Each structure stands twice: as structure tokens, then as C-alpha cells.
């Protein structure tokens, strides 16, 4: 089932990129003069940036929870 879903998502991404290959100009607060890239590349960059930022948030939460578990285990050993 996972393979079917992955294949479907890949197909959707492929058709999306094929149909949206027009150029867009990327500027960032005047730092760059303007870089022209295909639209689907801009979408892919935004998608993976979101994954990375979300993953970092998850890692921070994970470390915090592990620290809390260690503290609770130490408290349990003292009892």
C-alpha cells in the first residue's frame, strides 16, 4: 500500500513539475539581483525547507522529552 501511495505522489510531483516549468524570479530583500529558476524548483525548495525546519523543531522537542525522562527515572530510583 505504501508503494502505491509513494508512486502516486511521485507521479503527481512529476506531472506538476512538467506543467509548471515557467521561470520565476527569486529576490530576497535586495540582497540578490534576482535569480531566475523554474517555478517547480521554487516549490521543491520551499517544501524541503519546511521539512528541515519542522525536523529541527521535532529534534528540539525530542531532546527536551529525553531530558525529562532521565530526570523522572532518577527521581524514581531515589524513591
Image (cartoon, grey):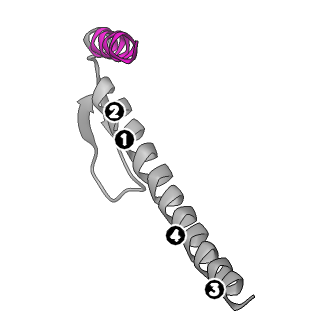
Q: Earlier in the sequence, mark 4 or mark 2?
A: 2
Question: Do the residues under discs 4 and 2 have CB atoms within 8 angstroms?
Answer: no
Q: Which of marks 1 and 3 is in front?
A: 3
Q: Residue at x 53, y 58 (%)?
A: 57
For the residue labelled by badge 2, is the local secondary structure a helix, a strand or a loop?
helix
Between circles 4 and 1, the one closer to the viewer is 4
Residue that mark 1 sits on: 48
Q: Which of label 4 and label 3 is nearer to you?
A: 3
Q: Which of marks 4 and 3 is nearer the N terminus?
A: 4
* In the image, residue 49 lies in the stretch drawn in magenta: no
Rendered-image quadrant of the C terminus: bottom right
Q: Which of marks 1 and 3 is nearer the N terminus?
A: 1
Q: State left or right for residue 77 relative to residue 34.
A: right
Label 3 neighbourhood size at 10 Å, few (<14), some (14-19), many (20+)? few
Q: For marks 4 and 3, give the CA distance.
A: 17 Å
Expressed as whole percent of the image width and height from the top left, the position of residue 69 reads 61, 72
Q: Which mark is residue 63?
A: 4
Residues drawn in magenta:
1-17
| Cα gap from disc 4 to disc 2, whole angstroms | 28 Å
Residue displayed at 33% across by 59% down: 31
For the point 25% across and 10% down, the residue is: 18
Circles 1 and 2 in contact, beta carbons < 8 Å: yes
Disc marking residue 44 = 2
Report the quarter where the N terminus lies: top left
Q: Residues within 10 Å of mark 4 (few under 14, many from 20)?
A: few
Amino acid at each position: 500500500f505504501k508503494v502505491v501511495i509513494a508512486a502516486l505522489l511521485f507521479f503527481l510531483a512529476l506531472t506538476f513539475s512538467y506543467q509548471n516549468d515557467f521561470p520565476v524570479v527569486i529576490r530576497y530583500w535586495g540582497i540578490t539581483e534576482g535569480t531566475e529558476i523554474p517555478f517547480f524548483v521554487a516549490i521543491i525548495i520551499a517544501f524541503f525547507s519546511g521539512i528541515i525546519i519542522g525536523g529541527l523543531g521535532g529534534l528540539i522537542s525530542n531532546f527536551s522529552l529525553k531530558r525529562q525522562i532521565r530526570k523522572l527515572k532518577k527521581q524514581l530510583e531515589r524513591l
